[in-house]
Image: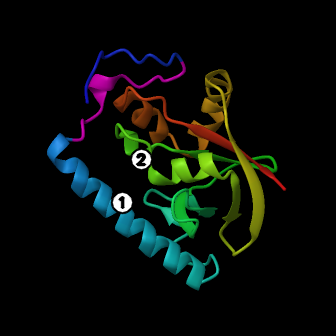
């Protein structure tokens, strides 16, 4: 999982050697915990219409993103950090800086029509598009004002963590 210590992304300020590596043996466990926590978070968030489990540990806001599964065609939902930017919402396919994209990334690439529910239960339809590397670099400072750990996640992996800009429909 480790490569060169200097990030290949100029906008990332965190140095790879300054963050803990996820041991290869722990990756399946970490993925399983993330999946279970997300399912529980989505269930509570929706049952309470956005009144409970609206914050990620550390107090960061959460939104529920609904999409259509790429293979199944079934509705899927995931809890993600809520990153508003004016009327748009930014989604980050970080998966904590692991070496593979999260499953929801492939779903949105296949069908970019999503709906996003925020704290309080308000829900809106969006069209997601993956931004270019230059757009990502431009958005990066804004992203870090809401959730600074994304810088560590990008430093942890050699894959370019995808960023989506979701525009209201």
Q: CA distance from mark 2 to mark 1?
A: 9 Å
Q: Is residue 26 left or right of residue 101?
A: left
Residue beneath label 2, please? 95
According to the picture, the residue beneath numbered tag 1 turns out to be: 34
State the SS at label 2: helix
Q: Which mark is residue 103?
A: none
Q: Looking at the picture, does residue 48 appear above or below residue 88?
A: below
Does the magenta segment cover residue 15?
A: yes
Does label 2 or label 1 sit earlier along the sequence? Answer: 1
In the picture provided, is 25 more to the left or to the right than 76?
Answer: left
Asked if the residues shown at circle 2 and circle 1 are in contact, with their CB atoms under 8 angstroms apart, the answer is: yes
Element on which disc 1 rests = helix
List the single residue furthest toward the bottom.
47
Q: Is residue 56 above or below residue 18?
A: below
Q: Quadrant of the C terminus?
A: bottom right
Residue at (44%, 16%) from the top-left corner? 8
Q: Position of residue 141 (x, y in %)?
A: 62, 31
Point 24% across, 41% down: residue: 22
Is residue 167 found left or right of 54 in the rendered image? right
Label 1 crowd (10 A; few <14 / some 14-19 / many >=20): some
View extreme (right): residue: 169
Image coordinates for residue 98, horizontal then vertical, percent: 35, 40
Q: Is residue 15 above or below residue 29?
A: above
Q: Position of residue 119 (x, y in %)?
A: 65, 69
**Which residue sits at x=57%, y=85%?**
47
The stretch in magenta equals: 11-22
């Amino acid at each position: 999982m480790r490569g060169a210590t200097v990030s290949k992304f100029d906008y990332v300020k965190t140095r790879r050697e300054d963050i803990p590596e996820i041991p290869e043996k722990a990756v399946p466990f970490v993925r399983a915990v993330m999946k279970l926590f997300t399912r529980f978070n989505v269930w509570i968030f929706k049952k309470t219409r956005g009144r409970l489990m609206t914050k990620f540990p550390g107090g960061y806001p959460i939104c529920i993103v609904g999409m259509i599964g790429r293979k199944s065609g079934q509705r899927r939902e995931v809890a993600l950090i809520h990153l508003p930017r004016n009327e748009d919402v930014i989604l980050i396919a970080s998966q904590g800086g692991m070496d593979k994209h999260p499953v929801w990334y492939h779903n949105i690439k296949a069908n970019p029509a999503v709906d996003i529910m925020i704290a309080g239960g308000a829900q809106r339809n969006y069209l997601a598009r993956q931004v270019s590397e230059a757009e990502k670099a431009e958005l990066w400072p804004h992203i870090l004002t809401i959730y600074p750990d994304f810088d560590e996640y990008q430093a942890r992996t050699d894959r370019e963590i995808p960023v989506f800009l979701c525009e209201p429909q």
